[in-house]
Image: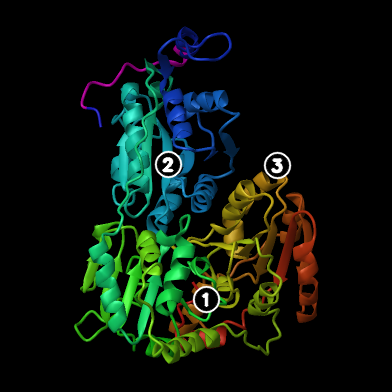
Amino acid sequence: MDSRPPIAAIGRADLQERRAAIVGAEGHEKGDMATGGLLIVESLAAHGIDRVFCVPGESYLGLLDALYEHRASIDTVVCRHESGAGFMALADARLTGRPGMACVSRGPGASNAVIAVHTAQQDGVPFILLIGQVSTGDLRRDAFQEIDYGRMFGGLAKWTVEITDPARIPEAMLRAFQVATTGVPGPVVIAVPEDVLTASAARVPPLRSSSVRCPPEQSGIEAIETLLGRARRPLLLAGSAIDRPGGRAALLAAAERWALPVLVAFRRHDLFPNHHPLYAGEMGLANPPEQMAVLDECDLLLVAGARLSDITTQGYRFPMATGAGPKLIHVHSDPAVIGTHFPTDLALACDPAATLAALAESKAGGSIERSEWCARVAHERYKIARPRMFDVDDGIPFESVVARIAGHLPSDAIVTVDAGTFGAPVYRLIRFAGEQRLLAPISGAMGFGVPAAVAAGLRAPERTILCFVGDGGFLMTGNELAVAKERNLPLKVVLSENGVYGSIRIHQARDYPGRFVGTGFVNPDLAMIGAAFGFAVSRLSTPSDLDRLPALLAAEGPQFIIVDTSVEAVMPATAAQGDRSVL
């Protein structure tokens, strides 16, 4: 970012003297000078950041010291692994709409946090990763734990910057927040050498820009109305850009005004009430052929705030990429994602939520001829949402667990789901509605569930936080329950235990029948682990034990529910069909 020579490195013996020169006895900055660390923290505060997640490192002690000064307004959450810290930041961003903030040390710390950067990019979540870097005098000299982060994150982050001049910090922070939140939200990586964090610079008011607004033009609204008015079998596909204040209400109102069946993008079930007659379900990893046969009959697809990725389009086949497909209207605030895989009949680079709100206020409306179409689409969704019966003897079908929980899920619940086979029935059987929220990794990253639940508990301690996780994913980041213990968070964790990486075993059974290797493992005593983190532990081993679930969910305090889960219940059907929906 800065072509000028780097500032002189500050040795460790100089730190206390330098800090004393600009900080008074009471710990406040003197005059118009501030440390680089304090300039960063003041920018965070100006952008509404009230929580950061970190694993500490000596490379950013200057930033930690600045966070100490602001400890009354910014909560510093100490995590046990950088991947957990990153996942927590992403879940927090999903709940607040503000960029999630994680701080890690150089080298190993940054490497451990890569999974969060990838997940933020895939999920379209605003995220800022701040990395303490080696001193400026050691840059590009293969110093201890040095990495060139521009090269490391070049294909993942929306922007990567290394700040070598403390005077440039306000400008860099301004750009970081703007890039992370504009267009398709995503990750920004900021590397700051340790001596820059402790060096002094002129104090300036934190820079903050207004949000970029892309209101729809009236001509665009009228064009959509014209196409909708001519359509007999339209569909509306809603994506992550609707997940903002007023977005859900606008989506519901527009769907009802125009009699539009609503599909939601991958793992975005909480955008539209799932019990509503116009709810058409999710565009998931592998929708049933019967459902797709009906959806293929649509003559108009209105995409609002979604990217037409491989999953959303069922392998780039829906809608058809030729002229034989339906008319396509794509509305997104980022023009870069429009028309990339499918030709559009109408392309609008504007706010999807505002567009839906305008359509909801339209004097026009849906035709009565659509009632049969809406019923057919809804019927296919209801077929998917029916729980199945199983005849197995190797444990409890996890689908039965989810079905029982679905009938007793509190109206304020925030549900977090890790990646794995166990999660598939969550998306099929739980009917999200109202204030209920779903936090699941669009990227399919294992290890997301527990950190996301902890972050949700910190953000909304008064609400019911329910985490679904498998034994594979739990042992990746389950140590973050230490934060739940520290903060007395009454999380409800439902852990599926079967000693198998289930989704991979299913594909293995399909492609290499009977040749199972590398997909089984032996667990430690998970009950003891749950108890060590301060949870009340229960184990469900037989179908009759499911009767205990309502009471366990309603119980006070943290609950750790282990389910001895059947592998047979998922293996035969999914292996035979080559079902990708278990991932």
**Cα distance in 3D space between marks 3 and 2:** 24 Å
Image position, residue 76 (x, y; %) = 57, 35
Label 3 residue SS: helix
Q: Which residue is mark 3?
A: 486
Q: Of all residues shown, which one is farthest toward the front?
A: 363
Q: Is residue 285 visible?
A: no
Report the magenta residues as a range: 3-14
x%, y% of residue 182? 33, 49
Q: Inspect the image, locate mark 1, and give the three-letter code of the amino acid beneath it.
A: Arg
Out of 122 and 572, give the one closest to the viewer.
122
Residue holding disc 1? 505
Q: Which residue is tagged 2?
A: 129
Tell whether label 1 touches label 3 (CB within 8 Å): no
Q: Nearer the viewer, residue 561 or 233?
A: 233
Q: Label 3 sits on what residue type?
A: Glu
From this view, report whether residue 355 is shown above or below residue 457: below
Quadrant where the N terminus sits is top left
Q: Callout 2 environment at 10 Å: few (<14), some (14 to 19), or many (20+)?
A: many
Q: Main secondary structure of the magenta part?
A: loop
Q: Decide which of tag 3 and tag 2 comes sooner along the chain.
A: 2
Say how the picture is coloured.
rainbow
Q: Residue at x 49, y 47 (%)?
A: 86
Residue at 39 percent across and 90 percent down: it is 369
Q: CA distance from mark 3 to mark 1?
A: 36 Å
Instruction: Give the quadrant of residue 140.
Output: top left
Pointers 2 and 1 in contact (CB under 8 A)? Answer: no
